[in-house]
Image (cartoon, helix red, strand yellow):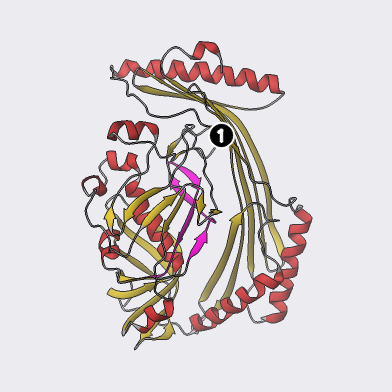
Amino acid sequence: MSPTAFDTGTLEARHHELRKMRMSMVGGKLISNLRTLERGVSARAYRGGYWGFASAPAVGSSADEAAAMARVERQAADNARAMARFGSRQPLDLPGEGYRGRHAFTGKPALSASECGERLAALNAWVEKTYPGLRPTQFLISEEEHRKQLRTDLGGDSLASIQRGVFAVTLVGEAEDGAPIEVDEVLSGLGSLADLDWSLDTVAPLIDRLHEHLQAKRHAVAARGGPQTVVMAPELAGMLAHEAMGHPCEADAVLAGAVTADLVGQRVASELVTMVDLAHSYEGREVMCPVYVDDEGVAARDVVMIDRGRLNHFMHSRETAARMGQAPTGNARAYNPGDEPLVRMRNTVILPGRSTIESMIEGVDDGYLLLKTGNGQADTTTEFMFGVTLGYQIRGGKLGRAIRDTTVSGSAIKVLQSVDAVGNDMYWTCSGYCGKKQPMVVSVGGPSLRARAHLGGE
């Protein structure tokens, strides 16, 4: 950092590399093969109650990068002072510490583009041979790696990395009326595609089960619309935790008027429900999106948002923590090299309970099993709507016919309050992105849940 940057306030300087690859194949034909690299430097300064931010590409020699960093540090401080033209502010006493540490994933040597293409072609050939009546099968693989070096004027000096690999397969067929139908499966994990097991031995049984679901969807019936008893498979529970309750527990949303602002200490879920935003570990193992230090240089810690049904705590940056008189939690994160840190989730999960999904189904006389979701949205009132791309009727405690694609919606608080069983199973995924002004790599997890929710349908 340049000495001129240290007048008064706070300064953070970040060097950020983002590498991505994406390859897709349809019917044995490679239709995309993209690889990108972004490198940039950025700085954020807090002066006179205002934040200033500046960024620039990191190109050329190490001396060129050092010069670019010095420029963005000065510009960030100048930008913060310029904001004071909008009126004076009482500066906050921002909590924090000078975190020092290095956290980088070390995995297997990366697969080459040709190796990835050969694997996809072999998988496609197996599907075509095993299930010749399908429409062209779709495969997608991707890798993403963030590597961030951060220094702060509190003495912080850290290296942090997030790396994930994703494999997805979509089987496409026809319903009885000739309309196209789809089912998909996604595998994701910490590290690159070389660290993720997407071998034929692993993928073939998954595709076999997908094909069974696809045949069931050929004869699917419409769900009965309205309030229903539903057993949500873990994939939907993870989405519910993230979209419907996670965002309203981000402290910047709370300060902006989220419904959770006045609910701390109150029962917002069944006492069977505990929801946590994990920093980097669960049961002694690294989670899929390990955050040891955030992009403000704060040591990351777990946040128990809901503790046995009661709203307990929020996720914080340094500023939101200061405004609410709490401690920062290490949730300030930036996606691109030119992005400013925002309060973001990391690994949001509903903790497992004691029930089996089989016992949950047996306990439903008339309802639905919801297995997969394709998308979801929610707002700060906890109202949500998710697409359901795979589900089955439950009649007399047994599975019935598959249902057509539909939606599940409601108030997350009311749905979670209605939970009467939490599964002992656990599902993790790190395959998508969270959207909030900028994308973000996150993971979600959860067990199966039995609750009441509103289904779209006839």
| Residue situated furthest front in the rendering | 284
At x 32% / y 51%, what residue is drawn?
A: 379
Secondary structure of the residue carrying numbered label 1: loop
- Choose between 404 and 272: the one closer to the eye: 272
Left or right side of 210 for 413: left
| Residue at the spot 36% in from the left edge and 86% down from the top edge | 397
Q: Main secondary structure of the magenta part?
A: strand
The amino acid sitting under disc 1 is Pro
Res. 329 image quadrant: top left
Q: Residue at x 25, y 57 (%)?
A: 268
Q: Is residue 322 magenta?
A: no
* Residues packed near mark 1 inside 10 Å, few (<14), some (14 to 19) or many (20 plus): many
Q: Is residue 84 visible?
A: yes
Q: Nearer the viewer, residue 187 or 357?
A: 357
Point 49% across, 80% down: residue = 217
Quarter holding the N terminus? top right
Report whether residue 222 is seen: no
- Residue 165: x and y in percent read 62, 54
Position of 421 with respect to 193 (left or right) is: left
Q: Position of residue 390 (x, y in %)?
A: 46, 73
To which residue does mark 1 refer?
A: 337
Please tell me whether residue 431 belongs to the stretch shown in magenta: yes
Q: Which residues are magenta?
A: 426-449
Residue 376 lies, in percent from the top left, at 41, 59
**Residue 55: x percent and y percent?**
54, 26
The quadrant holding residue 241 is bottom left
The C terminus, quarter of image: bottom left
